[in-house]
Amino acid sequence: MRTRIPYPALAIIVLILVASNVGLLLYLLTPAKAPMLTVSFLNVGQGDAILIEGPTGIEMLIDGGKDRSVVRELPRVMGPLDRSIDILVATHPDADHIGGLPDVLRLYQVSQIMLSGRVAESSYVDRFEDSIENERGAQVVEVREGTRIHLGGGAYADVLHPENNVAQLRETNDASVSMRVVYGDTAFMLTGDAGTWVEERLVKEYGNELKSDVLKAGHHGSKTSTGDVFLVSVDPSVVVISAGKNNSYGHPHPEVVENIYESGATVVSTAEEGTITFVSNGLLVERR
């Protein structure tokens, strides 16, 4: 004797099968999203914080501003449930670059911490060093020119500065970890607070190899960075200024902004626009 399935139950089963097949068909017909490199210049006031996500999901945070602003901005870019960061880079031990990093280390699991190795004394440095010691399992390394940081999917960051003379550098800014982030035919130039003499050294050593689509203005747009020679070699389409609105330092300096415009690049500022995000598919860089 056959067992008959009641009509309502049969109808539900048929609908489930149809829906499953339609879902599978849509999935097969939907073009796969191209892997992307994402670079976000976070709105942390008068300071620097840059979050980079490689094409395969590797996340690198460069600096953390002066205060807790960075942990306010990170969930907005990463999502509220993501509580791990693969690589954290402290470009140099100034308050407006490392002040927010202890809060990052407290709230996020960090796998690798990269430092310039520049020694400095301040309460910010003490707090940062204590937070590093408490970050269990994190690998701590000092980076130098020639270091390549792999970001997955063919993307990478090449460290261009500092060299091995970190201890002899007079200013902490001079020790800023400077890097060129590359994905396919696109690139981002990030130099922390490095001054014009560092830029000129890079131009002398690398020349047109510095070419990048996006440049973060050195030292928040200060007159001590983003020199004319460097601008010519990098030849960016966009220059990002990470600074606080109405800051007491007068950043960015009007002469620097004028020189950027004269170079043909567009200027965007976190002080005016908040967090600024770019995406690259390896061929083109677009503003998100």
Image (cartoon, helix red, strand yellow):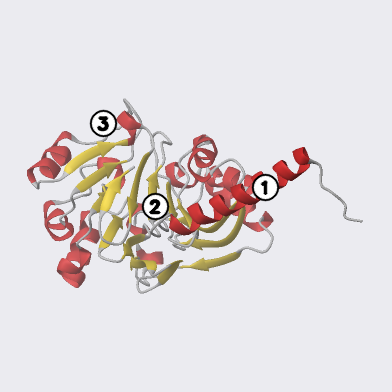
Q: Which label belongs to residue 38?
A: 2
The secondary structure type at the circle numbered 3 is loop
Find residue 99 and report its horizontal and vertical position in percent: 51, 42
The kind of residue on which mark 3 rests is Gly
Q: Earlier in the sequence, mark 2 or mark 3?
A: 2
Q: Earlier in the sequence, mark 2 or mark 1?
A: 1
Find residue 286 and report its horizontal and vertical position in percent: 28, 48
* Residue at mark 3: 250
Q: Residue at x 34, y 51 (%)?
A: 279
CA gap, disc 3 to disc 1?
A: 68 Å
| Most foreground residue, 53 or 117 | 53
Q: Residue at x 16, y 51 (%)?
A: 227
Is 250 on the left-hand or right-hand side of 146? Answer: left
Indicate the quadrant where residue 41 lies: top left
Outermost residue on the top side: it is 246
Is 217 on the left-hand or right-hand side of 148? Answer: left
Q: Nearer the viewer, mark 2 or mark 1?
A: 1
Outermost residue on the left side: it is 262
Q: Which label belongs to residue 121?
A: none
The kind of residue on which mark 2 rests is Thr
**Do the residues bearing badges 2 and 3 touch, measured as CB atoms within 8 Å?**
no
The secondary structure type at the circle numbered 1 is helix
| Most foreground residue, 111 or 173 | 111
Indicate the quadrant where residue 269 lies: top left
Find residue 66 and report its horizontal and vertical position in percent: 47, 39
In the displayed structure, 135 sits above or below 124; it is below
Q: Residue at x 30, y 32 (%)?
A: 249
* Residue at mark 1: 14
Q: Nearer the viewer, mark 2 or mark 3?
A: 2
In the displayed structure, 187 sits above or below 264; it is below
| Most foreground residue, 212 or 147 | 212
